[in-house]
Image (cartoon, rainbow, N blue to C red):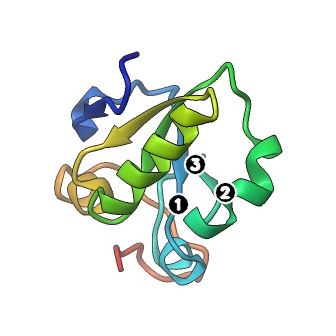
């Protein structure tokens, strides 16, 4: 993968390792089922939770935080790709979501 690659939601493989870097309240309201959640500000302290051999697809709400996270992760030797448009585009594309609050999943 090239440095700072960005892919549209439709190009994410079904078995992709997705890392959501949004805040806790955003995650609880709605996220990609099976994604891993590490808020962006916690990435440096929790880097050892990620496999440097995985191709990580990084997602946030609109793509800004995930782009910065991708830059940082690639600088640390990880294979990371930014998800264009983030959860907003995931929702717009009608992709499945789950919530942790028992309510219909939404993007905050």
Q: Earlier in the sequence, mark 3 or mark 1?
A: 1
- Dot 3 falls on a residue whose secondary structure is loop
Tell me whether circle 3 and circle 1 mark residues in contact (CB < 8 Å).
no
Callout 2 crowding tier (Cα within 10 Å): few <14, some 14–19, many ≥20: some
Please report the residue visible at 54 percent of the width from the left and 76 percent of the height from the top: 23
37 or 39, nearer to the observer: 39
Callout 1 crowding tier (Cα within 10 Å): few <14, some 14–19, many ≥20: many
The circle drawn on residue 21 is: 1
Please report the residue visible at 24 percent of the width from the left and 45 percent of the height from the top: 84
Q: In this orientation, does residue 17 appear?
A: no
Percent x, y of residue 83: 32, 43
**Number of disc labels:** 3
43 or 7, nearer to the observer: 43
Can you say whether 15 is above or below 46 in the image?
above
- Dot 2 falls on a residue whose secondary structure is helix
Q: Earlier in the sequence, mark 1 or mark 2?
A: 1
Question: Badge 2 is on which residue?
Answer: 43
Label 3 to label 2, Cα distance in Å? 15 Å
- Dot 1 falls on a residue whose secondary structure is loop
Can you say whether 31 is above or below 49 in the image?
below
Tell me whether circle 1 and circle 2 mark residues in contact (CB < 8 Å).
yes
Callout 3 crowding tier (Cα within 10 Å): few <14, some 14–19, many ≥20: some
Q: In this orientation, does residue 28 appear?
A: yes
Label 3 to label 1, Cα distance in Å? 10 Å
Question: Badge 3 is on which residue?
Answer: 35
């Amino acid at each position: 993968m090239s440095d700072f690659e960005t892919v549209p939601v439709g190009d994410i493989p079904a078995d992709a390792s997705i890392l959501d870097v949004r805040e806790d309240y955003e995650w609880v309201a709605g996220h990609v089922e099976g994604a891993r959640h590490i808020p962006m500000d916690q990435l440096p302290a929790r880097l050892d939770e990620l496999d440097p051999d995985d191709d990580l697809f990084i997602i946030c709400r609109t793509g800004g935080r995930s782009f910065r996270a991708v830059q940082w992760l690639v600088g640390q030797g990880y294979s990371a790709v930014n998800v264009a448009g983030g959860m907003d585009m995931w929702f717009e594309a009608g992709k499945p979501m789950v919530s942790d609050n028992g309510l219909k999943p939404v993007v905050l």
